[in-house]
Amino acid sequence: MKQQNTIKVWDPFVRIFHWGLVLAFTVAYLTGEDILSVHALAGYVILGLLSLRLVWGFIGPSYARFSDFTYSLSSIRNFLKDSLNFRAKRYLGHNPAGGAMILLLIASLLLTSFTGLVLYAVAEQTGPLAGMITITSEFIRGALEETHEFFANFTLFLVFVHVAGVIIESFIHRENLTRAMLTGNKRALDANEMN
């Protein structure tokens, strides 16, 4: 059997960030108000991971940089159309749809985390914003809670779309993208894929 050439694509930080975020979001989502201290701790971990990832998106290795996976809307649309026809171009880093998903997930998680911090300060009078934010209106508290829950659920929806995309792209290109996010290695582009 012929040995395939591989290339290191995902650096250790990106891989630890990815799986750490999966774990922290799962814990935060499953605990909610039931175990508020664990929920808040998971939220802090998410915020910390996102903060580091935002910095890494500018100073990290090439495949980790936002500039490597920020595409125009027409590129994203064309890639999705090609994917539906099972002829999408293979990318070593994030493809246009994957890049858009990463940006959407980061934005949604930041909004979930920020509304959670504000809600924690208002409802529990604790956390880093406690004392800085004093809202007594039940309507505003309710709106904060609804907004926090909306973005948490929207993030979960994005996660399902992301997983579906990974499965579809793994199938189209006969490549295990989940394993690549564990090992950091992907199959190198062959001559046909470079065009």
Image (tube, rainbow, N blue to C red):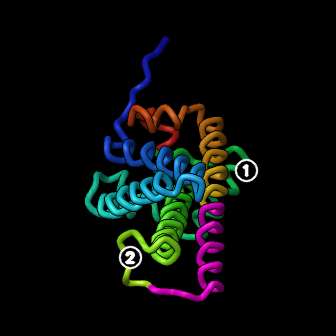
Could you tell me which residue is drawn at 46 percent across and 50 percent down?
Answer: 21
Which secondary structure dominates the residues rendered in magenta? helix
Q: In this rendering, would 121 be left or right of 76?
A: left
Callout 2: SS: loop
Q: Nearer the viewer, residue 95 or 158?
A: 158
Magenta stretch bounds: 134-154
Queried whether the magenta region covers residue 140, the answer comes back as yes
Amino acid type indicated by mark 1: Leu
Marker disc for residue 84: 1
Q: Residues within 10 Å of mark 1 (few under 14, many from 20)?
A: few
Q: Nearer the viewer, residue 143 or 9?
A: 143
Task: Establish if 7 lies above or below 129.
Answer: above
Queried whether the magenta region covers residue 137, the answer comes back as yes
Which residue in the protein does label 2 denote? Answer: 129
Amino acid type indicated by mark 2: Leu
Residue 153 pos. (x, y %): 65, 61
Q: Residue furthest top?
A: 1
Q: Residue furthest right?
A: 85
